[in-house]
Amino acid sequence: MKWFGLIATVFTGILLLSAVPDFAAFGDPDSPANGGLGDHPSVSQYYITDTYTDTKVPNIVTAVLADYRGYDTMFETVVIFAAGIAIFAILRSFSGPVAPSHPTAIDTSVEGDHQRIIIGTTCRVIIPVIQLFALYVVAHGHHSPGGGFQGGVILGASFILVALAKDLSAALGRFSEKRYLALGSVGILIYAGFGLLCVALERNFLDYEILHRIMPATDPIMARSHSMLGVEVGVAFTVTAIMFAIYANLSSKGRLEQGF
């Protein structure tokens, strides 16, 4: 197996290196990405000048990620999901409980664990604010820096903060293994579902314009804008779920008990 892995790595490296001479020179202003070809504008120039006309989305980054290169972003989300499932498959253990590897808190009274009282109270105050801000980042990604990846990371971090402030069981009480696995899957299905709807309406996969037929009070351009919000929600679901799933399994060695 080691030799097979080495051969595969060397072969892949040769393929990648063989493509290097086809790249434009670094910083070349006349490369296809920067200067275009013939009468055709460059890709970057087209994004800058035509994104808002095409999509009514002021944030060019969101439009590029969720629309112009929607295939790439969908499979980036799939890669994140696959990473979480791989960690689950490798680490998850269903054996019986083990002895704690670190001391637990004495209690949560004033006479007990003072540090935990301070941390726990602070987290109870700020976690709802963090989660609300995460939803804002997802919903407002069209108009300001943000989107599904950023909002999902913030939302996932809020559940990790629960585990750090109290224990992993408390976090799992709010976001159980069954729930985060289901939510991660639903996020992928939401993203792919928008593409399949386009196919069902006899257009290309993720060609959002056609969705104006089933979206009330909208036109082809606004259909692209609304669809981008929908797929960003799907991305946020998957990122939130997998981020917490990775933490839960790594911190507890796959037992989902105690944690750090």
Image (cartoon, rainbow, N blue to C red):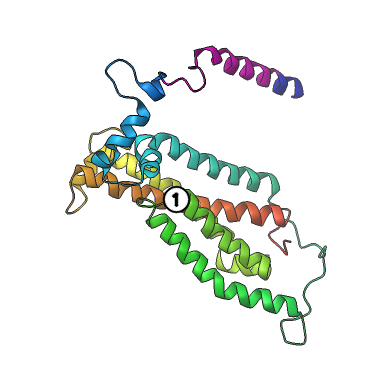
Residue 132 in view of the camera: yes
Compared with residue 190, is residue 128 higher up or lower down, i.e. above or below?
Answer: below
User: Mark 1 Cα within 10 Å, few/some/many (few <14, many 20+)?
Assistant: many
122 or 163: which is nearer to us? 122
The amino acid type found where label 1 is placed reads Gly
217 or 5: which is nearer to us? 217
Marks counted in the figure total 1
Residue 128 at x, y = what percent?
51, 70
Residue 176 at x, y = what percent?
57, 62
In the shown orientation, is residue 109 left or right of residue 217? right
SS for dot 1: helix
In the shown orientation, is residue 250 left or right of residue 190? right
Residue 35 at x, y = what percent?
37, 21
Residue 110 at x, y = what percent?
73, 87
Q: Is residue 16 magenta?
A: yes
Which residue lies under the disc numbered 1?
Answer: 148
Q: Quadrant of the N terminus?
A: top right
In the shown orientation, is residue 183 left or right of residue 167? left
Secondary structure mostly seen in the magenta stretch: helix
Q: Residue placed at 59% from the left, 56% from the top?
A: 244
Q: Quadrant of the C terminus?
A: bottom right
Residue 94 in view of the camera: no
In the shown orientation, is residue 34 left or right of residue 211? right
Query: Range of the magenta residues?
Result: 7-29
Q: Residue placed at 71% from the left, 56% from the top?
A: 251
182 or 118: which is nearer to us? 118
Q: Is residue 164 magenta?
A: no
Q: Residue placed at 66% from the left, 20% from the top?
A: 8
